[in-house]
Amino acid sequence: MFYIGSLIRSLPLSSAGPFALRSIHTGSGNYFHYTPVLCAEPLKKKKKIDPQVLKQREERKKKRLEKQIRRLEKNARQLKPVEDLDIPIELIDEREQRKRTGIRVTPEVLESRVLLEKQWAKHKRLEKLADYQLIDKVLAAQTKALNELRFESEELYQKAIEPDMGIVPLKVEGPVATPPIDGYDMPDGEYIDVSKKWE
């Protein structure tokens, strides 16, 4: 025991750490030889499973997969519902309360409504014809005036048919590319997918 203690004290300071004893090793037979401790346990024996049990498990898996495939095929023809077009459950529950009963329209009221719709259609048709006739008159007067002007002077005619840029002043100035936004924290590509999954 005295020899081991004096040997550890005689080691340099750098090797006197927690693994200092593991480095004590010489080729002479008079000194001891230390090897690291291997913390291991024996391998567990594989349990032998009955082949019939394995076969039943595989059959169960197969049946489960076939059931999922059948369910997917059944739902394949159904369209995904649009949530905005769904009727709220509250309205479905209140259908009987909101249902109007006892409103009967007499034949005289129905006939007056039909006559009113016909009169409105006739009025709108005459209004549209009047607009067309007015446009035709204006275009005919413009064409006649231009023809008279051309007969008098070709130079004045060419000046008259030029587009007047002063009527609609258009001045466009702006950047050719979008400028950067100050203090904009650019996303790093990660996002949370909150869309619903449909089977």
Image: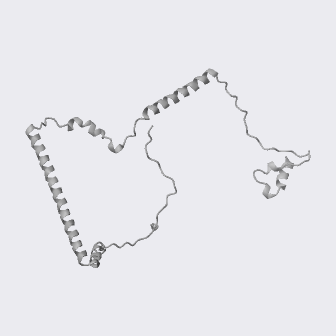
170 with respect to 25 (left or right) = left
Residue located at (15% from left, 59% from top):
130
The residue lying furthest to the left in this view is: 108
Q: Is residue 18 above or below residue 78?
A: below
Q: Is residue 36 above or below residue 148?
A: above
Q: How many marks?
A: 0
Residue located at (18% from left, 64% from top):
137
Residue located at (77% from left, 50% from top):
19
Which quarter of the picture shows residue 109?
top left
43 with respect to 163 (left or right) = right
Q: Quadrant of the C terminus?
A: top left
The location of residue 145, given as percent across then percent down, is: 21, 72
Seen from the viewer's position, the closer of residues 125 and 26 is 125
The location of residue 75, given as percent across then percent down, is: 43, 34
Which quarter of the picture shows residue 156?
bottom left
20 with respect to 122 (left or right) = right
Residue located at (82% from left, 57% from top):
12
